[in-house]
Amino acid sequence: MLPKPHRASIVFYVADIARTESFYNDVLGIGLTRQEGAEPFWLSGELDGGLEMVFFQMEGKRGNTPALVFDLVDGGIDDIVAALAEKGVTIVTPIEEAPGGWSADFLDPDGFGLGLWQSGDKPRSLK
């Protein structure tokens, strides 16, 4: 079972990262920050209340963006993905390296994309 998330991010795949940066910073005043670890750079910004918005430049299609990504603060991504698969959850992207750590994507019963992200300094298994 997925531990109760302490934090979540909404991830958007966008066609032009510079255009997105300008819109969210200059028009909406959200204050996105450039991050390294993907080409080109990616963006992140936290809204009041703790919800993080993340933007990657890549092809997005309806159904896979935006996606809600749960941050696994204690680690254990291997255990959690295995438990989800045992319960019949569709795993879309198995565990793979992601900027700063590890990620995996899965679907809810209606086909909405959900994801997990874990920092690379946390253990992949807690067993």
Image (cartoon, rainbow, N blue to C red):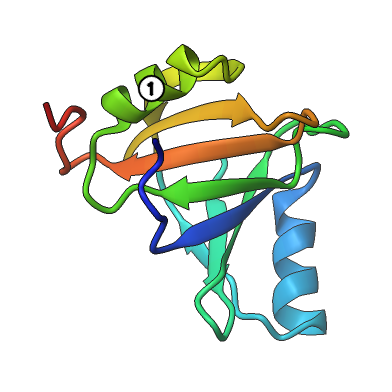
Number of numbered discs on residues:
1
Q: Residue at x 21, y 49 (%)?
A: 74
Left or right of residue 37, residue 10 in this image: right
Mark 1 lies on a secondary structure that is: helix
Q: Residue at x 70, y 34 (%)?
A: 58
Q: Position of residue 112 (x, y in %)?
A: 75, 35
Left or right of residue 16, residue 8 in this image: left
Left or right of residue 120, residue 111 in this image: right
**Which of the 4 image quadrants contains residue 117?**
top left
Q: Residue at x 80, y 31 (%)?
A: 110
When the figure is inspected, residue 36 is found, relative to residue 89, above or below; the finding is below
Q: Position of residue 34 (x, y in %)?
A: 51, 62
Locate the C terminus and report the quarter of the image it occupies.
Answer: top left
The answer to which of 92 and 84 lies nearer the viewer is 84
When the figure is inspected, residue 110 is found, relative to residue 48, above or below; the finding is above
When the figure is inspected, residue 67 is found, relative to residue 55, above or below; the finding is above
Name the residue beneath numbered marker 1: 83
The answer to which of 84 and 69 lies nearer the viewer is 84
**Which of the 4 image quadrants contains residue 44?**
bottom right
Label 1 is placed on what type of residue?
Answer: Ala
Q: Residue at x 24, y 34 (%)?
A: 76
The answer to which of 81 and 66 lies nearer the viewer is 81
When the figure is inspected, residue 88 is found, relative to residue 73, above or below; the finding is above
Q: Position of residue 51 (x, y in %)?
A: 56, 70
Q: Position of residue 37 (x, y in %)?
A: 40, 42
**Which of the 4 image quadrants contains residue 100?**
top left
Would you say residue 125 is visible in this rendering? Answer: yes
Would you say residue 39 is visible in this rendering? Answer: no
